[in-house]
Amino acid sequence: MPQPNVLILRAPGTNCDQETGYAFDLAGGNSSFVHINQLIEAPEMVRDYQILCLPGGFSYGDDIAAGRILASQMQSRLADVLAEFHSSGKLILGICNGFQILIKSGFLLPSDDQGLPATLTWNDSGRFVDCWVNLKTDNEKCVFLNNIDQMYLPIAHAEGKFVPRNEQVLNQLKGNHQLALSYCLANGSDDDVVYPHNPNGSTANVAGVCDTTGRIFGLMPHPERFIDPTHHPRWTREGNSAAGDGLALFQNAINFFNN
Amino acid sequence: MVDSVTNTTTSSDESPTTQGQETTTLWQVDIFPVAGQPNRLSAEVLDNARDLRVDESLEVIAARGFLIQGPLTHQDLARLTSELLVEPVVERCEFALVGSDSLSQPIGNLTNLLNVLPLPGVTDPQAESALMAMRHLGFPVDVVRTFKKFWTSSLSESDQNLLHSKILCNDSIEMIVVGKLELDELQLGQKYEFSKQDIPLTDLSDEALMKISQDWTLSLSLIEMHTIRDHFEKLGRAPTDIELESIAQTWSEHCSHKTLAGRISYRDENGERQFENMLKETIFSATMQIRSDLGESDWCVSVFKDNAGIVEFDDSYNIAFKVETHNRPSALEPYGGANTGIGGVIRDTLGTGLGAKPICNTDVFCFASPDTPFEELPPGVMHPRRIMKGVVSGVRDYGNRMGIPTVNGAVFFDERYVGNPLVFCGNVGLIPKEKSFKEVQPNDLIVSIGGKTGRDGIHGATFSSAELTESSDITSGGAVQIGNAITEKMLMDVLLIARDRELYSSVTDCGAGGYSSAVGEMGEEIGAEVWLDRVPLKYDGLSYTEIWISEAQERMVFAIPESNWEQFESLCASESVEATVIGQFKPTGQLVLKFGDETVGDVSMSMLHDGRPPIIREATYQPVPASDIPSFEFKTTAQWTTDLCKILASPNVASKHWIIRQYDHEVQGGSVIKPLVGIQNDGPGDAAVVRPVLESRRGLAVSCGMNPLYGDLDTYHMATSAIDEAIRNCVSVGADPTRIAILDNFCWGYTDRPETLGSLVRAAIACQDLSVVLQTPFISGKDSLHNEFSYTDEAGSRQTISIPSTLLISAMGQVPDVANCVTMDLKEAGNVLFQIGVTGDHLGGSHWNLVNHLSGGKVPTVVPERAKQTFIQLHKAIQKGLVRSCHDMSEGGLAVAVAEMAFAGGLGAKITTNEVGIEIIPSDPDSQIELSYATAALLFAESNTRFVVEIAPENVEPFKAAMGDIDVQELGTVISEPNLTIEVASNTVIQSDLMTLKNAWLGTLDWK
């Protein structure tokens, strides 16, 4: 099986592209960095890839709201080609800003007659925060989280609070196993997960969401920032693990095509 | 949603794609959070109002908004708001034509309406992005501006004024409109009428010459004005305005460092010393000596000549490091000042060699206490808490957006920074070895890329060389800039691609002095002709001189061979970066400035760069007489423990997590040691370590040292202590002391006073002395002089506050293999604790003095050879894996170091100072006070070159062997109980549970 090709999408303000590409390559992929202008000019190029990744950063400065401008650009210029990409069984991953873009473009959770079912908005603290969080998965559907139960990863964002339109939306997503990743306590418990364990005030502690097929996944934490044992904030006291928790997520994406 | 007020010229059914409107309309969109979502903007105002003690009954409802101008219909606005401007689920909006009554209906009992808009010409990144996005969607939008809108309850007139001037609006960048917004159109600038201005200088009196210097904010001295007059008399013509400005920019303190690189006659207790070029003969000369001592193993690459210093890193890469200050802009507009400070220093490394890739930031600030009572502030000064919040946000928003981890920093508080805060911004860049040098070639095109040019920051270079006063915020409005990080990020992306495609021969940043400095420097050896009318402008109306000296942000200048221009231009276009040819490096030796066909300036490069008359200054240093032991009460155990808590809680020592957590310190994926470490990820690490090359195990450590309080006693020892501290921090985490490069940043008061300049020269001599012995080279540096604030007090007399002499030393270390890095948190009960180094009675300038309001005592000194050996031996021990944790001893001495290690590790410690010798001779061994002072010194002295280390029992002997001749004293053991006990002379003098200590440390700056 050839190495799956990964398209790492760059836009003005994208800034986690290099390390995300490195993580995919380490997991066995073959990453290319493509600027949004290039993709809009020749959208059919996406057919050469198996995985599309929207990495973290501040696309267009997160001006107006996080991810909003790139989301609007993708919606108006790339909707068809991305729908085709997805329906042909390929994978789409959005990390941090990429998650914000996937949510706000409606690619991840499509609009209904009342508009978008959910959004990611300002952290309860009103500030950007960089810290590590414990996460647990519902991996019934999400192919990126296959065989992963718990992870410890860093977050770094200002607008990561997941807000569904209402209880009904939330229950439906939960029932569909789309609330794939959530903040929890170190022991895996989700009783009373408050700040800083839930770092932004997300409803139902949601940290990542997948679509109904499990092949589009967006998450606020940064798996590419924990692929090396020395990324762990306490490696000097707890000793080195073999690899960082985040690497498995990239391996799952690659193995999806290799198995 | 509010319906649009009927507009006779608008038919609401037309969409932009079918038929554009003929008539331009101006729409206003107000955006509110939906019910149940927090209104963050209101909360922030209420928060600040509480700080300023505005009437507690104040109620506020705030909205953010956009003003949108263009031939747009109601339906267009409906689409724009729902598809772009208003967040789904959490926001709602109201829109109508500007001036519509529907937009100014009181909300409940909130009847006061205030609108805050950026002043015309002030950078508005949100609006720029929104405009671009609207056009992408196909809407014919001409201009966009953002604004904020506040409904407030009624207030007294004084509270109202406070709200307007101190909370809602900073009048150096914003304006306030009370009541309904009524605007016909958003100003787009005015057409510029060209007229060339000559400034005759012949026959002018000295007063008249100085008036020209002042009126034009040239900051030129009389002798300099004479030199310029004489030069143009010889040419037989008057200078033009742009020629005068070019000379003023090039000769400014900011650009030429004329004071410190000038002739100085220095006198201190050791006699006299004459300098032709003070910096060159001290700090620079030390580096030259080290390089020659090292011979073949010299690892410096480029020092003191490019925008940043460069040293070797590994076989493929070098690293560049630069730290800049942005003090005056930050005093006027903290957010914009800090924002553009970090933006500027990033361009420095980008503009080093053929371009270094920025890999981490460091930021150090000096403020007055955030608890300063509002009534005690001098007039015209912003509250330090507001300055600090603004500065931190400015650094955060720029650094995070650039995708550069901010990994190191420090904050120092002293009341003397009240009118003149200091903001140091630093950046490290990674550069391929073969890209470390550049050379402009004759006939290369002069190409500007990145941001457009506006009136931003005009006279920044000359303004930053002058003193601040209470009216600075009025006279220097143009000096304030706001950055747009994404413009710079885009610029950085294309720069690195173009570098690797070898498309240009040289590059530099546009910083202070704008094009005038950038082109002037690049063309120094060749000559240049600049076509000012081709420069892309933000708005019409700029004169040729304004274009030339504007300090608009996010611009860089390239020298591009004509044959590469097409390729370079298309690369820029593919990433939506604007690139413009603005001239050519013509080999004439002249700087020729043209606007259309008119030549507006023609000065020789030699006049610009070598024509400045030398400044000769006097500098004297009078040592502060040594003082006796301060008188203080004999202390009980409870009191010593209280002292420890007070020092832990003092703002310089207290946890900076409120700041650190707002910075992305992990982007780029190379984080090894984070700024906060330990069992709960919240202990104070000594230095951060990153792996800049993801495929490699080699690490880079960044740290700093600074202690202005020592400078009050002796700036020589302040300087050596700062160097020692910066190196200690680096060595503590595992950096190789033979591969540490350092930078100096001198921020001083008014150096025209011989004694102020003398204290600086003394510090520079100290830098020279110590760096040579340690073989630690200075590779770059920067100074900021005249940091004083003047105002008239209530009694009508003129007051001046000078900052304490402040020398920041920044260190960049290298870790051969990050697997050997060490952190400061205690690791395991049963391990043995040692102190490395010698304790003296160095309580002068200490934090123990500070919290006890004592003065006097001896300033910490450095024993250079001992320091060198200590660093080398400790590094050996760390490399051998013998050290489980290591923490440098600085503010608060032994007690603070051990306390921090304990609570960071969640483990207790039981130690005694029995083995710790103390280098003091009590004049009277029976004196209770002297014994008590000895206890204070053992616990809290800030003697240099000391560390506390934790060693596993089985490694104690190998550790001692590795340390060789270096003084190592056993302190005690790590225990599992969460308590800290310290015994001095068999008496328990400190006893506390860790929670108490940690809470003291965490609480002071734990802002919401």
Image (spheres, coloured by chain):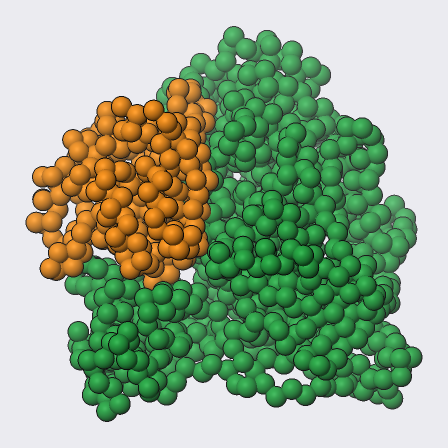
Chain colours: A orange, B green
Q: Nearer the viewer, residue B505 or B633?
A: B505
Q: Horizontally, is B724 left or right of B294 in the view?
A: left
The residue drawn where x is 56% and y is 71% is B536
User: The N terminus of chain B appears in which quarter of the rendering?
Assistant: bottom left
The residue drawn where x is 64% and y is 19% is B876
Which residue sits furthest bottom? B8
Q: Nearer the viewer, residue B755 or A204?
A: A204
Query: Which of the 4 image quadrants contains residue B47?
Result: bottom left
Q: Is residue B718 visible?
A: no
Q: Is residue B363 visible?
A: yes
The residue drawn where x is 25% and y is 64% is B83
Q: Nearer the viewer, residue B404 or B784?
A: B404
Rendered position, B150 above or below B369: below
Rendered position, B120 above or below B556: below
Query: Which of the 4 image quadrants contains residue B11?
Result: bottom left
Rendered position, B955 above or below B496: above
Number of residue marks: 0
Q: Nearer the viewer, residue B893 or A20?
A: A20
Rendered position, A237 above or below B369: above
The residue drawn where x is 74% and y is 37% is B300
**Residue B156 image point, x, y percent:** 32, 80
**Residue A4 image point, x, y percent:** 35, 32
**Residue A128 image point, x, y percent:** 37, 50
**Residue B811 image point, x, y percent:** 64, 39
